[in-house]
Image (cartoon, rainbow, N blue to C red):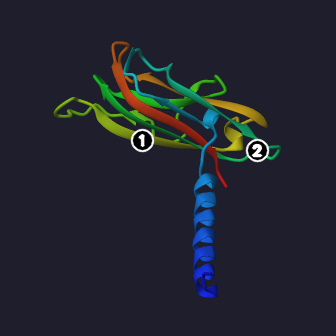
């Protein structure tokens, strides 16, 4: 029969594992709040058109700010405006929004992350809110963006 010390050590180890497992699951994002695309797509347009995936979140009775993050590999042939459409509305920049034209050696793709914070005054509604990446050429309707692997997530700030 195991000693009391051995049982205490095992009990503490099991308890620590349960706490860690619970903490990790607390950071999980619900499926409708995250989108991922692993298929390249090229869009040629002057600003502004919808071109990214869409995600949604359900706001509680007391509408709270949300954080939307888009991470992507992309290649552009001209300066691009990049923004966010909230609930099918206009393409707006809630933070950084310029895709600069850079010469990138190799594949020509660059990895970028845009993060926007939207407040209730920006048009967030009680209930369901949908977010979609949008944009287009800043100077020309011949501007093109090739979007590689990308993810879009939305989370209510706490």
Taking the image as shown, residue 137 lies to the left or right of residue 107, namely: right
Q: Residue at x 61, y 60 (%)?
A: 23
The residue wearing badge 2 is: 63
Are there few (<14), some (14-19), or many (20+) residues within 10 Å of tag 2?
Answer: some
Q: Where is residue 108 in the image (x, y as percent from the top left)?
A: 23, 29
Residue located farthest toward the right when viewing the structure as drawn: 61
Q: Residue at x 34, y 18 (%)?
A: 144
Q: Position of residue 50 (x, y in %)?
A: 52, 20
Q: Which of 6 and 37 is in front in this view?
A: 6
Q: In this view, does 12 lie above or below 3?
A: above
Q: What is the total number of numbered labels drawn onto the structure image?
A: 2
Residue located farthest toward the left when viewing the structure as drawn: 105
Whichever of callouts 2 and 1 sits on the residue coming sooner in the sequence is 2
Residue 143 falls in image quadrant = top left
Q: How far apart are marks 2 and 1 (CA)?
A: 25 Å
Q: In this view, does 59 lie above or below 7?
A: above
Q: Position of residue 77 (x, y in %)?
A: 28, 22
Residue located farthest toward the front when viewing the structure as drawn: 1
Are there few (<14), some (14-19), or many (20+) residues within 10 Å of tag 1?
Answer: few
Of helix, strand and loop, which one carries label 1? strand
CB-based contact (under 8 Å), mark 2 and mark 1: no
Of helix, strand and loop, which one carries label 2? loop
The residue wearing badge 1 is: 113
Q: Which residue is drawn at 58% across and 82% down?
A: 6
């Amino acid at each position: 029969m195991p000693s009391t010390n051995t049982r205490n050590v095992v009990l503490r180890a099991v308890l620590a594992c349960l706490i860690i497992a619970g903490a990790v699951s607390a950071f999980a994002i619900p499926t409708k709040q995250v989108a991922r695309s692993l298929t390249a797509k090229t869009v040629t347009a002057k600003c502004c058109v919808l071109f990214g995936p869409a995600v949604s979140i359900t706001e509680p009775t007391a509408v709270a700010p949300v954080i939307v993050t888009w991470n992507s590999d992309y290649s552009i042939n001209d300066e691009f405006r990049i923004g966010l459409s909230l609930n099918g509305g206009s393409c707006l920049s809630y933070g950084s929004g310029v895709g600069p034209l850079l010469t990138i050696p190799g594949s020509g793709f660059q990895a970028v992350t845009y993060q926007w914070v939207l407040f209730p005054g920006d048009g967030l509604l009680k209930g369901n809110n949908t977010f979609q990446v949008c944009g287009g050429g800043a100077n020309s309707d011949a501007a093109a963006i090739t979007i590689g692997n990308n993810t879009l997530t939305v989370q209510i700030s706490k």
